[in-house]
Image: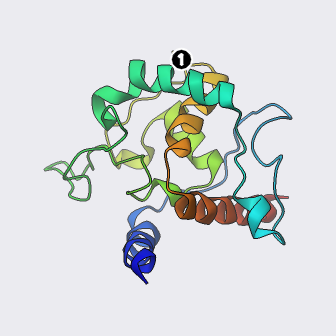
Amino acid sequence: MNKLRIVIPLLVVGLSACGQSEDSEPSVSSAGPGSAGTASSGQALASPWYSAAQVTEGERVFKDNCAQCHGAQAEGDSDWRRADSEGKYPPPPLNGSGHGWHHPLRILFTVIKNGSPGGQGNMPAWGDSLSDEEILSSIAWFQSNWPEEIYAAWRRRDQQARSKTQ
């Protein structure tokens, strides 16, 4: 019951917070996302798509490039749900307490690479300064800090999104 008090509000915020298209797909190696798990096995779905090396590299990438806006522990802006005077949202938490967990990997990757979609925020495009591998590693780092139940819910959503595009 206690877990439901955390997950349900996150689910409500997650379902209502973003409206970005899920059409773009990151270019990843064969050892990348989606290599573990199937829709029929909840246990396998919760296994990470990333390696320990990606998490280590991702911590460096995140701290060097992302922490100035998203916080050292990916906690985000304290008022991340409230748009500013221009209608843009501050940096959300990426530590599992915000709505980022409901985006498939390809959306997380695309937003980091290309910046905030449609004027929704001030996220700059990192595609010219970070490699695809560094972007994936930064995602690996912040996802490695998510509570197990949030990561498992994300894996299920990511698998569902992948099955729609295959």
Kindly indicate the quadrant of the structure image that contains residue 13: bottom left
Label 1's element? loop
Give x and y (percent) for residue 37. Answer: 81, 57
Q: Quadrant of the N terminus?
A: bottom left
Q: Amino acid at mark 1?
A: Asp
The extreme front residue here reads 2
Give x and y (percent) for residue 65. Answer: 40, 21
Provide the residue designation for mark 1.
Answer: 128
Query: How dense is the environment of label 1, judged by Cα within 10 Å: few (below 14), some, or many (20 and up)?
Result: few
Q: Nearer the viewer, residue 147 or 33?
A: 147
* On screen, residue 88 above or below 43: above
Kindly indicate the quadrant of the structure image that contains residue 130: top right
* On screen, residue 42 above or below 131: below
At x 53% / y 61%, what residue is drawn?
150
Q: Quadrant of the C terminus?
A: bottom right
At x 29% / y 26%, what residue is drawn?
68
Position of 109 with respect to 117 (left or right) is right
Give x and y (percent) for residue 67. Answer: 34, 29
* On screen, residue 57 above or below 71: above
Q: Nearer the viewer, residue 106 or 61?
A: 61
Position of 163 with respect to 154 (left or right) is right
At x 44% / y 75%, what residue is drawn?
3
* On screen, residue 109 above or below 65: below
